[in-house]
Image (tube, grey):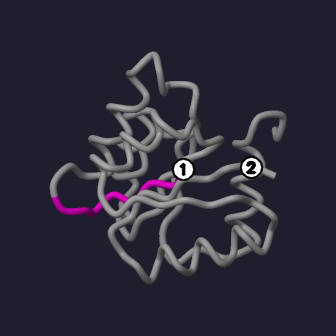
Amino acid sequence: MAHILIIDDSPTDVRVFTTLLEKAGHRVSSAGNADDGIAMVKRARPDLVIMDVIMPGMNGFQATRTLSRDAETQHVPILIITTKSMETDRVWGLRQGAKDFITKPVAEKELLARIQKLLPGGG
């Protein structure tokens, strides 16, 4: 299946998403902050990035903008998953270059369906 990179500072969320994605057959790696995540995208070339918004240092909106505007990484779809539930947050995330936006908590079936749509040839 696909290689998915999770950029999230919550070890609990990373563990939950990793378990779910590995069970679905995906290969998962993670970064605990945006700077490390951006470096990992450039190095590992994942098929998809799951991005948190609220992180220390650079936030997920800034990291999404950085990745989506870099010719080296702009092809990697970004799925923002966050507790920020305002419509303005969703719109802003998509304007930064995210391909989709989900509010936590997210149902397993919905997450897997959204990921499938974003993966190459998925949708």
The answer for how far apart the CA atoms under marks 2 and 1 are is 14 Å
Nearer to us in this view, 68 or 47: 47
User: Where does the image place residue 64, in percent across and percent down from the top left?
Assistant: 38, 40
Provide the major secondary structure of the magenta segment: loop
User: Where does the image place residue 122, in percent across and percent down from the top left?
Assistant: 82, 41
**Vertical placement of 45 versus 34: above or below?**
above
Nearer to us in this view, 110 or 23: 23
Dot 1 corresponds to which residue?
79
On the rendered structure, is 108 left or right of 51? right
Task: Mark 2 and mark 1 in contact? Answer it, CB < 8 Å.
Answer: no
Instruction: Please tell me whether mark 2 sits on a helix, a strand or a loop.
Output: loop
Residue 51: within the magenta? yes
User: Where does the image place residue 40, in percent across and percent down from the top left?
Assistant: 43, 44
Q: Which residues are magenta?
A: 50-56
Q: Quadrant of the C terminus?
A: top right
User: Where does the image place residue 100, in percent across and percent down from the top left?
Assistant: 56, 46
Nearer to us in this view, 30 or 66: 30
Dot 2 corresponds to which residue?
2
Q: Residue at x 32, y 50 (%)?
A: 36
Amino acid residing under circle 1: Leu
